[in-house]
């Protein structure tokens, strides 16, 4: 049953031409994810590709919604990789909540469209288990100049 | 017992001349609220009235604390409506945590006074079950130009 | 066993020349911390010293990483004091998640280095129980002009 679910997830990733990145440990004094009971708290993941490129820019200035969606999808893949490393994607019961930040000018208000890039990817890969509550916010800047950063709380089987 | 509590809540709402809005589904790829065990995660609610008017502005510029309090109260009513839709207000055990953002200039520091508008409304309606932990923050802008956005984690009976 | 752990914590605090501040109740309509089951939600703590001085400034302008680290350590001590008041530090099972904000110019990206001041202090005082997931963010301004604000979710024995 569990392996069937895992094969479903792998199949969906392949159908979507997505590959989970291999992420190293954070360079700072925190953990990528911490499990407590059935709740997995996943640290903020910025829009950095597996090749180490930070997708940067600022919504309303040198980044448009399309660039934001691409960056948000990178964050979502990084979140999935962190969950897979921590407990195995086959043990996800439900993505409960995303908090998402988009580097924005003080006049850009399309953060929800941008963050939908991440939300839709999670639903495409995990099915109904990927349907989550969410808060989408602007930020004046983000660590390493990233365009998007997203963290997550996930319910998992233990 | 449960119905008594619900009648208390309805009575308090009426005494305060408050009415829970009827909110539609989000226009984006997320859920209004997700339940996991006894924890209900409620998505960020902006200061949009039931009539569809977004209460906007920026603290320190064209919005003062009084306008902020009004906007924060709208967010709190929207949160209550989301909780009611998800599990029924009579099943609230405790509002655990609010995260609140107030659109602000880089010099306005009265976010706590603004967010008290939401905190006090929750206490007025729910009594001690409405007493919560909180983080109040500024934001350079918010989705749809809203003045205030608030999300919540709520402990509920299931 | 529990008292041994508490004596360890007190010893580490003394070795690090740290003293838990005595914090009064918040001036606003929220609680310092709210417990639900094994989860303690701790309200955002700004960089205000026990003497009442707010460590302010803006990263990238009049505050450097070193000033930020000092401010982040003050926030961490305030968080520990709130946990101690709520449940007793000896009952901490694990610090699960920190959310941290650093007042920053739109060009400063060293928030992770700043927040490490808090993360490292929690690990120094609590050992492995202090190792947490984290999201580090900039803010254009923070309540009372503080340089840093941090909230926490903590798993505790009840």
Image (tube, coloured by chain):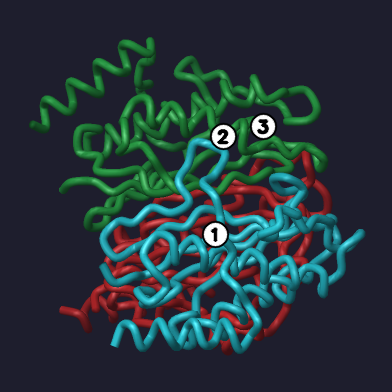
Chain colours: A green, B cyan, C red
- Quick check: do tags 3 and 1 share a chain? no
Vertical arrangement, residue A19 with respect to residue B13, above or below: above
Residue C135 coordinates in the image, percent (x, y): 51, 48
Marks 3 and 1, how far apart in space?
A: 26 Å
**Which residue is located at x 64 percent, y 30 percent?**
A147
Vertical arrangement, residue A42 with respect to residue A14, above or below: below
Q: Earlier in the sequence, mark 2 or mark 3?
A: 2
Q: Nearer the viewer, residue B11 or B136?
A: B11
Mark 1, residues whose alpha carbon is within 10 Å: few (<14), some, or many (≥20)? many
Callout 2: SS:
helix
- Chain letter behind tag 2: A
The residue that label 2 is drawn on is A115
- Chain letter behind tag 3: A
Residue C63 coordinates in the image, percent (x, y): 77, 54
Marks 2 and 1, how far apart in space?
A: 16 Å
Whether residue A96 sits left or right of residue C120 in the image: it is: left
Instruction: Give residue B102's mark.
Output: none
Q: Nearer the viewer, residue C47 or B40?
A: B40
**Which residue is located at x 38 percent, y 53 percent?**
B34
Q: Quadrant of the N terminus of chain A?
A: top left
Mark 3, residues whose alpha carbon is within 10 Å: few (<14), some, or many (≥20)? many
Nearest to viewer (mark 3 / mark 1):
1
**Which residue is located at x 51 percent, y 19 percent?**
A52
Callout 1: SS:
strand
- Chain letter behind tag 1: B
Callout 3: SS:
helix
CB under 8 Å between callouts 2 and 3? Answer: no
Name the image quarter holding residue A113: top right
């Amino acid at each position: 049953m569990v392996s069937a679910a895992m094969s479903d997830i792998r199949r969906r990733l392949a159908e979507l031409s997505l590959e989970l990145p291999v992420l190293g440990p954070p360079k700072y004094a925190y953990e990528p994810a911490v499990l407590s009971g059935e709740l997995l708290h996943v640290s903020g993941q910025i829009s950095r590709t597996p090749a180490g490129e930070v997708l940067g820019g600022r919504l309303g200035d040198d980044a448009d919604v399309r660039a934001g969606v691409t960056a948000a999808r990178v964050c979502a893949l990084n979140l999935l990789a962190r969950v897979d490393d921590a407990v195995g994607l086959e043990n996800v019961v439900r993505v409960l909540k995303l908090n998402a930040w988009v580097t924005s000018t003080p006049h850009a208000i399309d953060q929800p469209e941008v963050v939908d890039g991440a939300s839709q990817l999670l639903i495409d890969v995990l099915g109904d288990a990927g349907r989550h509550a969410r808060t989408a916010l602007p930020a004046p800047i983000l660590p390493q100049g990233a365009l998007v950063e997203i963290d997550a709380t996930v319910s998992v089987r233990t």
